[in-house]
Each structure stands twice: as structure tokens, then as C-alpha cells.
Amino acid sequence: MTRGLKNNNPGNIRLDGVHWKGEVEPSQDRAFKQFETMPWGYRAMFHLLNNYSRLHGCDTIRRMITRWAPENENDTEAYIRAVSEWSGVPADSRITTTNRDVMVPIVAAMSRMENGTEAKAADIAAGWELFMLNK
């Protein structure tokens, strides 16, 4: 089982001092957040990507992934290509982070990239519902 799945943190969100709803504190992982359930981990991904858009102008997959997975830690271009291909959303198309039909496939693709396995649709859907209830 990958670290992200073990931590119910499918996006591998790092510890940063910000508390997210559903987060387990203190985390037993020294570098990454842990969540109570996988839907809470997906909710955090949706929320963080929404923040990227609202606060930093990250309104495309390319801009989001460049911030999410910086080149000093990742092959960012390969990450962008994979998320674009798997989600069916062009890397440079402007997206709305509150559009379920766009964001669920993007987050599913990001989880696949982070964990090397297909995400469970029910967990992502539940995470989306938590995001929409608790934006």
C-alpha cells in the first residue's frame, strides 16, 4: 500500500501547519498529512486546488500541477501530461474548480499519479460532496 493510501491522503499533501477538516493530528507520518478517511483526503485535494485557482490564478492543469508537484521534486511535465491524458482535460484549458465534471476526473488522475493505482470513484464522489458542503 502506498504512503498516500495508507494516510488516506491520495494527493500526498505535505504537513504545513494548516489544519484541514478530517485531518488526523498529530500525523504519525513525519512529512505528510493523514486524514480520517479517504473522502476527507479527496476533499482536501479539491479544496487545495480551489485555493490554487482563487488565490494564485492556477486555472489550468499545467498551472495547478506546476504548483502541486514542483520540478525540484517531480517530473512536472510528465505529471501534467499524465493528468491531462487520463482526465481528458487539455493541459492549458481554463477550468473552473467548482465544476464537478471537470474536477473529479482531474483529481482521480492526480491520485493515480501519486499512488500508482486507479482511484475509487465512490471515495472521490464522497470527497466532492464534502468539498461542496464545506467549502
Image: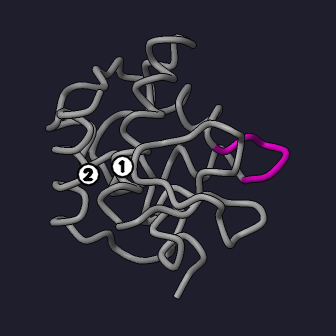
Q: Where does the image place residue 62, in percent across and percent down from the top left?
A: 53, 31
**Would you say 73 lies left or right of 34 here?**
right
Residue 122 sits above or below residue 62 on the image:
below
Residues rendered magenta in the picture = 69-74
Q: Counting other residues with Cα less than 10 Å from the Cα at mark 1, is it few (<14), some (14-19), or many (20 or more)?
A: many
Q: Where does the image place residue 63, in percent across and percent down from the top left?
A: 56, 25
Residue occupying image coordinates x 30% and y 37%: 89
Residue occupying image coordinates x 25% and y 71%: 120
Q: Which residue is mark 2?
A: 127
Residue 80 sits above or below residue 42 on the image:
above
Q: Counting other residues with Cα less than 10 Å from the Cα at mark 2, is it few (<14), some (14-19), or many (20 or more)?
A: many
Principal SS element in the magenta part?
loop
Q: Which residue is mark 1?
A: 107
* Disc 2 residue type (three-letter): Gly
Q: Where does the image place residue 74, in percent across and percent down from the top left?
A: 74, 53
Judged from this view, the residue extending furthest toward the right is 72
Callout 1–callout 2 Cβ contact below 8 Å: yes
The C terminus: image quadrant: top left
* Disc 1 residue type (three-letter): Val
